[in-house]
């Protein structure tokens, strides 16, 4: 396919082409922005609390 991504370790940034977004994607994808999907063994509630 034509999909592109930047990967490092076990992480990956998916790059979306305007008008050809794929799922999953941001609620309101914007050209020039990024969708980040990070993998962690830490519970999501712990990560969210740390970010607050």
Image (cartoon, rainbow, N blue to C red):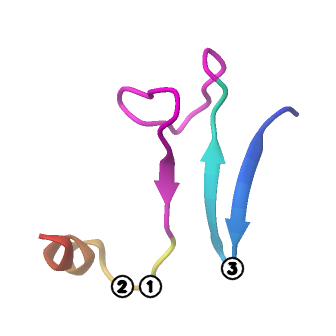
Q: Secondary structure at mark 1?
A: loop
Q: Is residue 42 left or right of residue 35?
A: left
**Residue 48 % position (x, y):** 20, 70
Residue 31 on the magenta segment: yes
For the residues bearing labels 1 and 3, Cβ distance under 8 angstroms = no
Residue lying at the far bottom in this picture: please name it. 42
Classify 43 as above or below 34.
Answer: below
Image quadrant where one finds the N terminus: top right
Q: Quadrant of the C terminus?
A: bottom left
Q: Residue furthest front?
A: 32
> Horizontal placement of 46 versus 19: left or right?
left
| Circle on res. 9 | 3
Residue receiving disc 2: 42
Q: Are marks 3 and 2 in contact (CB under 8 Å)?
A: no
Q: Residue furthest top?
A: 19
- Quickly name the residue at label 1: 41
Q: Mark 3: few, some, or many residues within 10 Å (few <14, many ≥20)?
A: few
The stretch of residues the image draws in magenta is 18-38
Disc with the residue nearer the chain's start (1 vs 3): 3
Locate residue 9: give its quadrant. Answer: bottom right
């Amino acid at each position: 396919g034509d999909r592109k991504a930047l990967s490092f370790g076990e992480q990956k940034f998916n790059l979306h082409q305007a008008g050809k977004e794929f799922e999953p994607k941001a609620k309101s994808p914007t050209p020039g922005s990024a969708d980040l999907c990070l993998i962690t063994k830490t519970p999501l509630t712990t990560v969210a609390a740390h970010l607050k």
